[in-house]
Image (cartoon, rainbow, N blue to C red):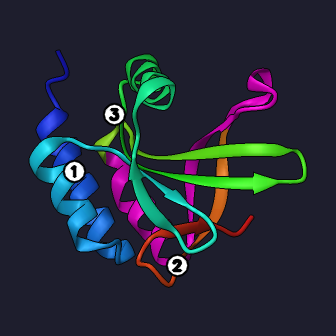
Amino acid sequence: MDKNIEAKKAEAITRMKRLGIFPETITQFERDGYISISEPPVGAFYWAEGDDLKRIKEFEAEYNALVYVVIRSYTTIGMMDSYLYVSNYPEEWKNDRRLLDENSTYAYVYNHDAPECSELGAIGIRRSIAAGLLREW
C-alpha cells in the first residue's frame, strides 16, 4: 500500500489545474480516480480502459507513481502515449511544477508499435483548444 497516495493525488490535482485541463476531467480524477487520455487533434478526453488502463497500472506499480493524465500522439514512428505522473519523490515535485509552467515535463512514453522502445524522458506539451493536452516534442 502506498503511504503517499493522498499526497500524490493532491499534487496531481494541483498540476492538472495548473495545466488548465478541462475541469470535469479533474473532477472525475479527484472523485472517481478516472485517468483520462487526451486525444488529438483537439485534445478531447476519453477514460483509459482495457489494455490502456492495464499498462498504466503496471507503470504505477513498477515506479510507485501516480499517473494523472495520458497524452496520445500519432507520429511517423507510430502511436505514443505519454504518461504524466507524480513520482514517489516529493523533493522533486517543486521542480516538476516549474517544468510544467515552461510547457515541458518528464513522462513515461509508451510506444504502441515498438513497446521495447518505451522510455522515461522529457517531452514538450501544450494545452489544446478543448482544454486537453497535446505533445509538442
Residue at position x 33%, y 47% from top? 91
Which residue was labeled with disc 3?
88
Q: Position of residue 124 (x, y in %)?
A: 65, 66
Query: In terms of depth relative to the viewer, which is nearer, 41 or 63?
Result: 41
Residue at position x 41%, y 40% from top? 48
Q: Nearer the viewer, mark 2 or mark 3?
A: 2
Query: In terms of depth relative to the viewer, which is nearer, 66 or 28?
Result: 28
Which residue was labeled with disc 2?
128
Q: Disc 1 versus disc 3: distance between alpha carbons?
A: 19 Å
Which residue was labeled with disc 1?
29
**Residue 132: which quarter of the image?**
bottom left
Q: Amino acid at mark 1?
A: Phe
Determine contact: label 2, label 1, CB under 8 Å.
no
Q: Amino acid at mark 2?
A: Ser
The boundaries of the magenta stretch are 91-119
Q: Position of residue 52 (x, y in %)?
A: 50, 31
- Spot the residue most to the right: 76
Note whether 22 is above or below 106 in the view shown.
below
Q: Is label 3 in a helix, a strand or a loop? A: loop
Q: Position of residue 134 (x, y in %)?
A: 59, 68
Q: Amino acid at mark 3?
A: Asn
Quadrant position of the N terminus in the picture = top left
Q: Nearer the viewer, mark 1 or mark 3?
A: 1
2 or 1: tag closer to the N-terminus: 1
2 or 3: tag closer to the N-terminus: 3
Residue 57, which numbered label? Answer: none
Residue at position x 43%, y 26% from top? 50
Question: Viewed as shown, does residue 105 lie left or right of 57?
Answer: right
